[in-house]
Image: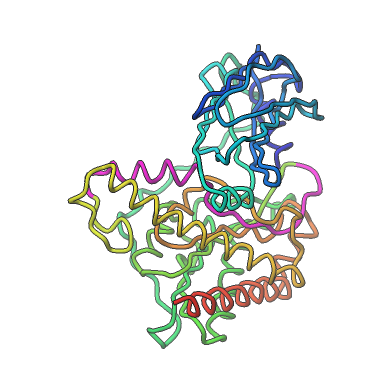
Amino acid sequence: MSLFLTLLVCWFTGVPAVAATIERVAIARDRIVVQADARVIGASAVTLAGPNRLALDVAGVQPGKRSALGGPVRAVRQSARRDGVRIVFDLSRPVVISGGSFGADGRTLTLELRGVDDARFARAAAQGRLSFLPPIGLQAAAPRRKYELTIPLPRPSKKPKLPPIYGDDASRPLVVIDAGHGGVDPGAIAPSDQLREKDVTLRIAKAIRDELVRSGRVRVALTREDDRFLVLQQRYGIARRLKANLFISIHCDSVGSGTASGASVYTLSEVASDKQAARLAARENKADIIGGIDLGGTTADISSILIDLTQRETMNASANFARLLGREAQPLIPLKANFHRMASLMVLKAPDMPSILFETGYISNPGDAAFIDSADGRKRIAQSVRRAVEVHFARRLAGN
């Protein structure tokens, strides 16, 4: 996926694979600034434990100058990689990357640091990679297109009608299954042009619903049961209005070329959580932001802290469920080697409801497409989800 993003950005910007050199690495108490002598393609960072380190991979650059050490970093080293450079920061105390962005010129990346305890550092090390992309299209001509298609999107209603809930026992936890795309949004399309993601995800969502209902352990609702368009906020909004205990968005992965295959799962990233908490806290209407609690009488700082604490607990629950799903799915369906990933996806941003986005396989891969759209494939996917759901709620019940 990182190689795909690299190639994609190259295509848009016209930047060669290695076009810049590291010019400066400045380290302060609360930030790291990495500057190149020309525009770079992108970067990603990962937290590493034992010993504690931060590793930054910058695409489209080669090793260069190093700056004096400072802050929580006791040593820095650079090494060339196939598509750029890896910069490793050896830490004298545990810190995590709480945010990061490129400057407007695409040359300077600023990583914001936050001190944490050993337990929080270990959780960050287990949560995967953060990605950073510079602004796209500066000083670049618009790409030549073979064709252009414009589709008017319908104006969504503010509160769509709530879907039916399957299951008779109101004391059981509620799982909401979201079939990705729909209506005028077909999603990814298989190379044969006969298989659309919106149709595949709906059939899988219904198979999961039927498997969960048969188990009798949970109640289930679908965000859509037919070919209709929903904006992303409506999808998790429906689940929150139903007071769901778990939200699963079903999708199919796709790449323009290559033989990528296997299922993967996404949960919300650390950086996305911080930004979302700040945005939510700044809203004028703070009623019912988290678990029915009205934050209207609190200051923006207190609201942000409360939302942040709630969302971090939700993120931990989401990550735990993602790992469960990987364990239960492994003997049943093909999985990617890096099954659990993190990203800032809108559909995952409910602050008080564990949420995952389940990429069930690659619709662009004929083998994967045949499997995920077969009766046997849907059955195995549904069984994977059912097993993970049962363990997830059994653990929560035992914890309570």
Asked if residue 42 lies in the magenta stretch, the reply is no
Magenta segment boundaries in residue numbering: 257-285
Q: Position of residue 162 (x, y in %)?
A: 35, 68
> Is residue 143 found left or right of 236 in the rendered image?
right
> Is residue 369 found left or right of 166 in the rendered image?
right
Q: Quadrant of the C terminus?
A: bottom left
Picture mark count: 0
Q: How is the image coloured?
A: rainbow
Front in this rendered view, residue 220 or 230: 220
Front in this rendered view, residue 356 or 278: 278
Q: Position of residue 364 (x, y in %)?
A: 73, 51
Q: Quadrant of the N terminus?
A: top right
Q: Position of residue 266 (x, y in %)?
A: 59, 54
Q: Residue at x 75, y 26 (%)?
A: 84
Front in this rendered view, residue 238 or 308: 308
User: Where 376 falls versus 81 (above or below)?
Assistant: below
Q: In the picture, residue 301 is in which quadrant?
A: top left
Name, please, the residue furthest toward the left.
297
> Is residue 282 found left or right of 227 in the rendered image?
left
Q: In the picture, residue 75 is in which quadrant?
A: top right
Q: Position of residue 115 (x, y in %)?
A: 50, 39
User: Where 166 falls versus 343 (above or below)?
Assistant: below
Asked if residue 275 lies in the magenta stretch, the reply is yes
Q: Residue at x 48, y 44 (%)?
A: 272
Q: Residue at x 57, y 22 (%)?
A: 33
